[in-house]
Image (tube, helix red, strand yellow):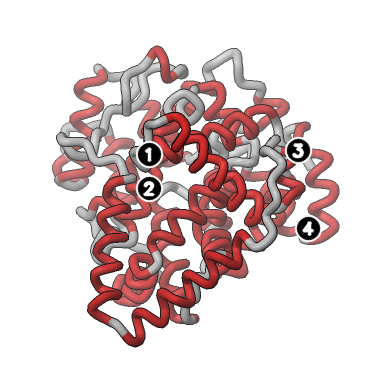
Amino acid sequence: MDMPHDYREGHAAAVLKNPVLADRYVAHTMLGDPLADAAVAELSRHAPQLAQEWVRLGMDEGAARLAEAPPVVRDFFIESEKVPDWFDEAATLPGCRAFYRNSEMFVGAFVAAVLIEGFSTLISRSFSITGRMVDQGVRRLKQNNRQLVEIFLPGGLDRYGEGWKLSVRIRLVHARIRQLLAQSDEWESAAWGTPLSSAHIAFATAAFSGLLLKRARMLGVELSAEERDAFMTIWRYAGHLMGVDPALQCATEEEALTLYEIGAMCEPPISLDSILLANGLINSAPLVAGIEEPAARRRLARRIYRVSRAMIGDEMADALRYPALNTTGTLLLFRLKGRAERLMHRYFPKLAQHRQLSQFQTMLNVSHYADQGIGYRLPGHVHAEKDGTI
């Protein structure tokens, strides 16, 4: 089977466990996103201001307003507006409620474990070369948090909801970075496959959905089967909007965890890029939380390292060069807190409501909201330091 050579060793092991999924995963490391890639290729041929206006029109006013735009750009929005048969918005409400009832723990699991695990693949090389996570960690972490806020708001994934727009925007940004990296001498296709490949977008989405549910349970979050199913549907649709190939979309938590496991086996060992990205994310987290005093930042970062190590395990933590920390009892404290939260919801509903409002305000504080709303400018240069903010 033809594949990028950095995947050969991992694929040989993964194929013994799940040959169909292992083959499918490595095949997708050589694929991008044909619909978004074609739209971005056409947009890049036009003046940036005009391209940005077409994207804004498509996002804010719909495909019908793109009569003067190139056909491939119009087609991109027409296809993006089609809602798959399996998506039932009403069925997502239990997932929305569950997320905001436990948003503090979900965000903790997201930042301390899932983002790091989701970026432990060769996708980290894309971010390392461009500098869009390493050099702009605080902004990117806040943007990731904002997508969480928006897709889990009731109606957030409606056609003109902010969650819908942010997810489709991410798809276009990925396509543009893919184009820039493919044109760069720094990208080695024979070794690494396609930049921001179809496999990597699917892997990250599986981590953000099924793996996030698993990590949140480690912090004491308990969801009903209905809530877990709704949570997965929300992320499946968000992934669909971000361009995840239907062959790698995960309908259930089990499917997502299987994709994560087999994908992780296929990937090459953790690289310096992943090490820099993981440690950069953890050290950015105190700044995202508004903590700027150096000693306080170090204390919080150390606490995050401890929780992260407890969740992702010593093997990955050591590979990422985390500080050596004793994690005994670390997760037990979170589970006890979760039990106390559930008792509060049962016996003191008004106090629980106040607690949820406080958590929601915290979510807003650690998310990126620009005064001018969602920006639609696409990257203009492969390196972030030579480009404006997006």
- Mark 3: amino acid: Pro
163 in relation to 37, above or below: below
- Mark 1: amino acid: Val
Picture coordinates of residue 265, whole percent (x, y): 75, 49
- Mark 2: amino acid: Asn
Q: Regarding mark 1 in the picture, which secondary structure is present there?
A: helix
The quarter holding residue 381 reads: top left
The residue pinned by badge 2 equals 145
The residue pinned by badge 4 equals 19
Q: Regarding mark 4 in the picture, which secondary structure is present there?
A: helix
Residue 269 tag number: 3
Check whether the beta carbons of the residues at disc 1 and disc 4 lie within 8 A of each other: no
Tell us which disc is closer to us: 2 or 4. 2
The residue pinned by badge 1 equals 288
Check whether the beta carbons of the residues at disc 1 and disc 2 lie within 8 A of each other: yes
> In terms of sequence position, does the residue under pointer 4 or pointer 3 come before the other?
4
